[in-house]
């Protein structure tokens, strides 16, 4: 009888000590565009206050590289892209959880120069002139800001002249870093990237009619083993608290 009582007591203690699913720890693997780095790190800290059992592991990079990693079976529960192109490609291949895709944010494309620049660069048109010998751009095949840059310079009829001077970064943060270090005369980044740096200044904002809208979509990955947790974190991105964080970094919230 004593042995049976001990067994029952142990079982009750196990049940009362978090055996339920609500207290189980969860690790979410989130792939996000490099331009979201600062905002996402802040949001993860904020989310952890009410969800201490959720550990969020980020993989930041160019949207194209992240897309390829997901297609190749890389562990990802949730994807935040800086452009529709990469999300559309995953959608076409059936990689997204149906009904989970959301358009979250809007950004702007800007031309930046180092703070101490003295070449009087003041417009995107200037990139094709003798004022600029080297310009940093995102690699257009996989880096959305590079794709937007090509659209802008194509619209301005100066793409060939600009391409001859271009050095291509693997993501928007590399473009920013090169410009901060004055390794180039100017660079094309998002307004939100320029805003976090005190080493560069914005000299021009790309007119809206020169490129597709810079929309950031997000979606849960269909192969995720943590779909419920991923959907909950994605829902958090449209909360008032999350919107304040995004706004602090210069993003415009769409949802």
Image (spheres, rainbow, N blue to C red):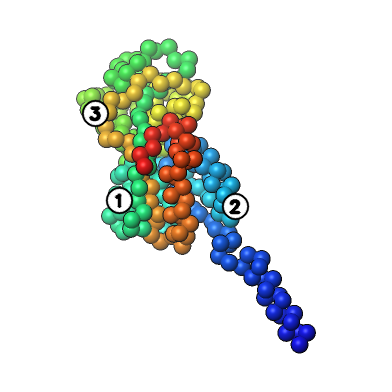
Name the residue located 30 percent from the left edge and 51 percent from the top edge: 89
Q: Please give the label number shown on residue 89.
A: 1
Of labels 2 and 1, earlier in sequence is 2
Give the quadrant of the N terminus.
Answer: bottom right
Q: Is residue 117 above or below residue 11?
A: above
- Residue 3 falls in which quadrant of the image? bottom right
* In-image side of 203 versus 75 (left or right): left
* 2 vs 1, front mark: 2
Disc 3, disc 2: CB below 8 Å?
Answer: no
Ranked by sequence position, the earlier of labels 1 and 3 is 1
Position of residue 174 measured from the top left corner of the image (x, y, whole percent): 45, 33
Task: Report whether residue 143 is seen.
Answer: no
Q: Which residue is drawn at 53% across and 50% down?
A: 57
Q: Callout 1: 10 Å neighbours few (<14), some, many (20+)?
A: some
Circle 3: element type: helix
Read off the residue under disc 3. Answer: 209
Q: Which numbered dot is residue 52? A: 2
Instruction: Please name the residue shown 57% across and 49% down the image.
Output: 50
- How far from the left and from the top, in percent, is residue 215? 33, 39
Of 188 and 106, which appears nearest the observer?
A: 106
Q: Can residue 194 be seen in this view?
A: yes
**Above or below 114: residue 55:** below
Q: How far apart are marks 3 and 2 (CA)?
A: 44 Å
Please state the total of marks drawn on the protein image: 3
- From the viewer's side, name the closer residue of 164 and 60: 60
């Amino acid at each position: 009888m004593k042995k049976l009582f001990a067994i029952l007591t142990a079982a009750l203690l196990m049940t009362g000590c978090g055996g339920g699913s609500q207290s189980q720890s969860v690790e979410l693997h989130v792939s996000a565009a490099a331009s979201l780095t600062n905002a996402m790190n802040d949001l993860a800290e904020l989310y952890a206050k009410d969800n201490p059992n959720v550990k969020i592991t980020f993989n930041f990079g160019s949207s194209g590289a992240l897309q390829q990693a997901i297609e190749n079976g890389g562990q990802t529960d949730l994807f935040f892209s800086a452009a529709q192109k990469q999300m559309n490609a995953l959608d076409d291949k059936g990689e997204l959880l149906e009904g989970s895709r959301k358009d979250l944010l809007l950004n702007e494309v800007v031309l930046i120069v180092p703070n101490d620049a003295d070449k009087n660069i003041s417009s995107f048109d200037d990139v094709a002139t003798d004022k600029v010998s080297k310009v940093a751009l995102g690699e257009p095949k996989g880096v959305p800001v590079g794709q937007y840059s090509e659209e802008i310079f194509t619209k301005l009829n100066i793409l060939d002249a600009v391409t001859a001077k271009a050095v291509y970064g693997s993501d928007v943060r590399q473009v920013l870093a090169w410009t901060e270090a004055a390794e180039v005369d100017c660079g094309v980044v998002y307004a939100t990237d320029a805003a976090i740096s005190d080493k560069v200044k914005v000299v021009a904002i790309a007119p809206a009619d020169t490129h597709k809208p810079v929309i950031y979509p997000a979606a849960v990955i269909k192969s995720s083993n943590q779909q419920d947790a991923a959907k909950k974190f994605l829902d958090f991105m449209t909360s008032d608290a999350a919107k304040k964080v995004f706004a602090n970094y210069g993003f415009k919230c769409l949802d």
